[in-house]
Amino acid sequence: MKKVLLILVATSLVFGIQAQKYAVKKAENLKLKSIHVKNDNDVMLPFLPVNKPTNAHNKSVTGVLIGTSVNAYTAIYDPNYQIDYNPELNIIMHTHRAGGAWGGVGGDLRCKMSLDKGNTWTDSVVFTQQGNNRYRYPNGIIYNPSGNTNPNDAYVLVNGPITDGAGWNFMYFDSKKKDGSNLVLNQVAPINASQLERINLSGGNGSFYTGSLKTNAANNWYERWYIRKLQFNPNTNGFDVNTIFNKTRNWKMRQFSNASIEWWFNWNNVFDTDGQKGYAWCFGAEQEFDPYNETSTPLVWGTTNGGQDWIQAYASGCWHTLSNLTDQIWPTYASIAAYPNNPENWVFRPFFEGGSSVDDNYSPGVIDYQGNLHFLAIVAGRYSSHPDSLGYSFANHPTLLFDVYTTGWDPIHQTYTWDVQFVDTIWSQVVSDDVSPYVGQDGGLGWEHMLNISASPDKKVIFAIWTDTDPQMDSLNTMPDIKVRAFNYENWTATPVINFTQGEGGLYFWVNTSRYVVKDGNDYIIPLSYIDVYETGNPDVAQKHYFAQNLRITPADFTETISPSTITGACITSANISKYNTSLKVDQNNPNPAKNNTQIAVTLPEASDVVVTITNVMGQKVMEINKGKLNAGKNIINVNVSNLQSGIYFYTVEANNTKVTKKMIVE
């Protein structure tokens, strides 16, 4: 009890008594009877009813000590796949840095294994640092060669960055046999010199993949996304490393409401167990293509031949019409004001928050039994199409978690089709480093909601796993409990939200789960590890790694029926997609900020009538420039802003039924 009280006092300094967050279960429940005032621009917004999980389970968790690390920084780099489960061998493996009471130094790695569903663990495989090259932020998987039935002849592959204490010198892709023999070192230079690479490991059948990012600091672009292929070599009994995917299109992802602050990195990728089918995805606003006018929707690449060929598909079209999404997110305030009694006319603008300051997570993904991609994402509803504008969000906007997934391929439009299932409302907030109660020599260590996603071995059931407070117990919204919701996409049933730590006060930090769960008869056991940093209060000292025992879901838990979305409005057509991808190009005005005059460069694919409309942050039109028909190619449009007050404005260029909007500043 003293522990709970102490952490409540500490974290109350972080949060204060915050307003609860609200979810919309049905759009028609929205009423304007009660009004909440948004502080930053005094916009009047609806106050929504609470959407609480139903049929909450009350289960308990026993933490089994796996081992110790020299400090807490073994597990904080997202996404980390420290836990792996191999259904063929029925082995769970946890990979972490060494140190502390269980021995070793912080530059070593230890791979602990359990052959009895997580009840007992052994120190099976150790990777020792080479000279001054120290292992950091590990991932680990077990590779079982085809036909092998001897667990000792399986291979352990670990990957992550290596440091000498001064910089990030190498990425490691090292391997050993499970019996500890046949060490193969495979250490290569990072894509960005002396920069830590993105690390996430997936695949199978001897082919595994990991991703890395290259940025363009001068232009604030995420310039390139690389995928490395790790191919098992039977001659060396190790893994060869090749870079197979190099995406060069420039992406600029901006934090909502502020153009000068870049988004956190939010690329990710996953490959199936066949080692052939895979996806890479990202949220943000691409320079060349943006049908939602920079409201951040996913862009996805897919491959079916192990990364030799990729198809790029814009995840656009029907997000604003999917009933499973619009039943939850908020519509635009303007549409509510215009049609207060006609919800069918409300306008929805989905905005994918993943990787932003809302949650420093990377929307992890898995592939289901039909080859469809599933990823967890926080999706919000905005009432503007301009993420750079000021104050364009609801007060007390709910943080809503969804399973976002492809449903197939549309060969006519050459794009993936999509749907979502609502997972839960997230009540707690992210704790940033600077306000964390856990402080070491280099400052505080904050935490996120630790989004994880797993699949059953047959890939028919998808498990959403995250940490969040128990709002019925913890009014300060601080305690990270382990929460799970499972979806069976074969028979379209789901569990309610299960809080496995309900009533325990929650102290489950930096949780990690395996990509596949354990099948135990007809039940599912979720392999999950965590660090209880509260035991020390100091992230710099040795930490204990725990396995959360018996996170069990039974067939009786699937008490809810789910269904695909209905489409409630018009989608963006293939003609729209082609148009946005190939036609009108509008450059940033120059100079910006502008005092008296500024210029806008507009490139047309064909001669078109061009109209420029300038609006203020409230959406009010302050100027319209009708240029008539301009020639194909690049045109310069002069704009006199001397009569405009200082502030932020938006200019929309319309040509041939296409619109592009950008922000400008007037001094």
Image (tube, rainbow, N blue to C red):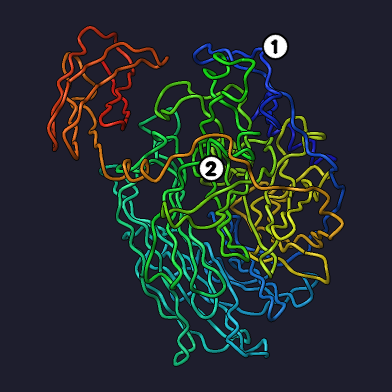
Q: Which mark is residue 194?
A: none
Nearer to me, 504 or 545: 504
Say which quadrant the C terminus sits in.
top left
Residue 496, given in percent of the width and then of the height, sits at 79, 46
Against 414, residue 611 (above or below) is above
Against 479, residue 344 (above or below) is above
The residue that disc 2 covers is 443
Residue 360, given in percent of the width and then of the height, sits at 53, 44
Residue at the (47%, 55%) spot, across then down: 410
How far is mark 1 from mark 2, CA to CA?
46 Å
Against 647, residue 221 (above or below) is below
Q: Secondary structure at mark 2?
A: strand
Of all residues, the one furthest to the bottom in this rendering is: 235
- Can residue 132 be seen at all in this image of the molecule? no
Residue 483, given in percent of the width and then of the height, sits at 74, 48
Question: Mark 1, mark 2: which one is toward the viewer?
Answer: 1
Residue 380, given in percent of the width and then of the height, sits at 56, 34
The residue that disc 1 covers is 33
24 sits left or right of 79 in the view: right
378 sits left or right of 486 in the view: left
Q: Given the image, on which type of amino acid does mark 1 rest?
A: Lys
Nearer to me, 133 or 471: 471
Circle 1 packing at 10 Å, graded few (<14), some (14-19), many (20+), is few
Residue at the (62%, 79%) spot, across then down: 125
